[in-house]
Image (cartoon, helix red, strand yellow):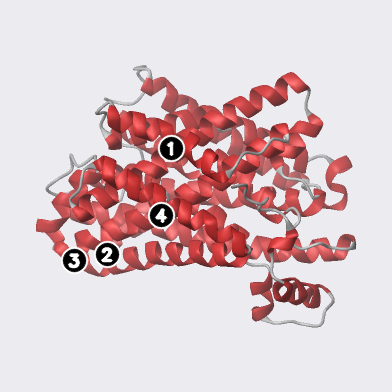
Amino acid sequence: MNTRVLTNPQLLTDQSRATARAVLDGERKGWRAAFAFAGPAVIASIAYMDPGNFATNIQAGAKYGYGLLWVVLLANVVAMVFQALSAKLGIVTGKNLAEMCRDQFPKPVVWLLWGVSEIAAMATDLAEFLGGAIGFSLLLNVPLMVGMAITAILSYGLLSLERFGFRPLELAIGLLVAIIGLSYIAELFVAPIHWAGVGAGLTTPHLADAGALTLAVGIIGATVMPHALFLHSGLTQNRTPSNGVEEKRTLIRFSNRETFIALAFAGFVNMAMVAVAAAAFHAGASDVAEIETAYKTLTPLLGGAAASVFLLSLIASGLSSSTVGTMAGQMVMQGFVGFRIPVLLRRLITMIPAFIVVWLGADATHSLVLSQVVLSVALPAPMIALLLFTGRRALMGPFVNNRALQWGAGVAAAAVLVLNGVLIAQALGCEIPGFPS
């Protein structure tokens, strides 16, 4: 039952490899050439449209209207920078972030990082798995445990596509991304969006109270994801073999373009989530804080079709992000300790926390939000490691981060880490000075 390593270049078809080689040799040009290198950023972008984002965005829009849209925009910009750095690390060094940690850090640190990353993988899968399960449960009117079983079977089916090569899996994930995006485009036409409010929310940074601060941190914590930073470097490390500096430069250029487009799309989806929640709930149902409540409230407000489209996007998000989370977990394990287990066993291990949560009768959405706190604890490791490695000339050569990028990314990382610290403090019941309750 072993699955092959997703970073193996042989998983690309002969045609895809030949097309990529023709582009690097200068034989093919134009916008179609980019498709030979497309895929890694699309897969990584799923982390930015997972059910954790649904939970935080619904709460933000319902309670604060369009007022936190600027946070979504800011988080997306930070995500673009770090995902681009992750992809560059894989292209230049031929190793993923976990492998670089294993090679560059002392063994005790490596084991510690691996343990933290495995916990983060389980927390990630908890959120993603529960999201899909909630969607199926509401759509089919079945118990949550049945929804979990359906999610488990379908996500494993998606992972099984990898045996036919990398492209089928990429296309399947891309289709689910398209479903999420089209769903929210449709919602924008149904919901009574106040576009002037959207413009003000995007351009006027403001936090009304401690609750807004908590949600702002939650949005950022749900956006910059540890497993996405590990995964992106693994997806690019051996995907297209290159010869020399110029070919690597070409690969990085194509990667940066794809990262920008994929994460800009993810950012649009997240902003649409907040805007739709603001339009539907803020005026008369600002206390909506759970996915199930949001669905049931949408029906009388915007109609059954809008509610069904919402569930469709949630299911697509849960299935795709759960699949990608398992891929990332396998990559983290192999990268840190050189050990790999069958994908079915990996899938079962990461599903266990979700089944325990449901079996104990815990609130699914609340558990989903708490998983974001766990991810916040794990986030510093990959962000700092990525900055250290891509800022080291001995590793990156001519592709080392320039001073402006290194400092800019460093400031962004510091800001994210401080905000995640605030989230953890508030989760422990600490009050934040200067913000009314």
Q: Residues within 10 Å of mark 1 (few under 14, many from 20)?
A: many
The residues bearing labels 2 and 4 have C-alpha atoms spaced at a distance of: 26 Å
- Disc 1 marks a residue whose amino acid type is Met
* Residue 184 image position (x, y, % from top left): 33, 63
Q: Nearer the viewer, mark 1 or mark 2?
A: 1
Name the residue tied to disc 3.
Answer: 305
Identify the disc placed on residue 187.
2
Question: For residue 185, which quarter of the picture?
Answer: bottom left
Residues under numbered marks 2 and 4 in contact, where contact means CB atoms less than 8 Å apart = no
Residue occupying the far left of the picture: 300
In the depicted structure, whether residue 281 falls above or below residue 309 = above
Q: Mark 3 or 1 closer to N-term?
A: 3
Q: What element carries label 1?
A: helix
Q: Mark 3 or 4 closer to N-term?
A: 4
Q: How crowded is mark 4: few (under 14 residues within 10 Å), some or many (20 or more)?
A: some
In this picture, residue 300 sits left or right of residue 335: left
Q: Is mark 4 on a helix, strand or loop?
A: helix
The residues bearing labels 4 and 1 have C-alpha atoms spaced at a distance of: 13 Å
Q: Nearer the viewer, mark 3 or mark 4?
A: 4
Looking at the rendered image, the quarter that the C terminus falls into is top left
Query: Between 75 and 89, which is closer to the camera in this rendering?
Result: 89
Q: Mark 2 or 3 closer to N-term?
A: 2
Q: Mark 1 or 2 closer to N-term?
A: 2
Name the residue tied to disc 1.
Answer: 351
